[in-house]
Image (cartoon, rainbow, N blue to C red):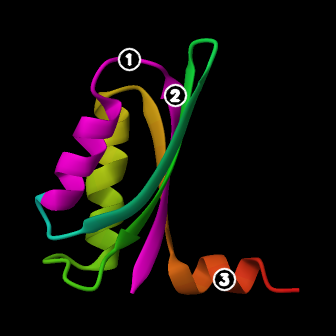
Amino acid sequence: MKAVITVLGKDSVGILSKVSTACAEVGVNIIEVTQSVLQDMFAMIMLADIGSATVAFDQLQKNLEKVGEDNNLKIHVMHEDIFNSMHKI
């Protein structure tokens, strides 16, 4: 199982580290990352393997939303099945 994690906010040192650490702490493996800084805005999309997560999906969402709140970021976690359903033609 996979999830798509998006992160948006004002650029600052350590964003990737904070998000990936929160994932690693609950057994979520980051598969791919793309990030950009547009002027002072940070944007990142991660593809994560949640198959070995030690918490339920909704708890992972809450954990990452808390990381976002603590760092003035908007973090959204979407299950792969929902993502695929939304993008089917």
Given the image, on which type of amino acid does mark 2 rest?
Gly
Check disc 2 and report its element: helix, strand or loop: strand
Q: Earlier in the sequence, mark 3 or mark 2?
A: 2
Reply above or below: 63 against 31.
Answer: above
Few, some or many residues within 10 Å of mark 2 (<14, 14–19, 20+): some
Q: Is residue 18 magenta?
A: yes
Q: Name the residue beneath numbered marker 2.
A: 9
Q: Could you say which disc has been placed on residue 84 in the image?
A: 3
Task: Give the residues in magenta.
Answer: 1-24
Side of 46 where 68 appears, left or right: left
What is the spatial separation of the Cα atoms under label 3 and label 1, in whole angstroms? 31 Å
On screen, 49 above or below 77?
A: below
Name the residue that disc number 1 marks.
12
Q: Residue at x 16, y 59 (%)?
A: 24
Q: Residue flagged by tag 1: what amino acid is it?
A: Ser
Closer to the camera in the image, 55 or 51: 51
Residue 81 within the magenta-colored segment of the rendering:
no
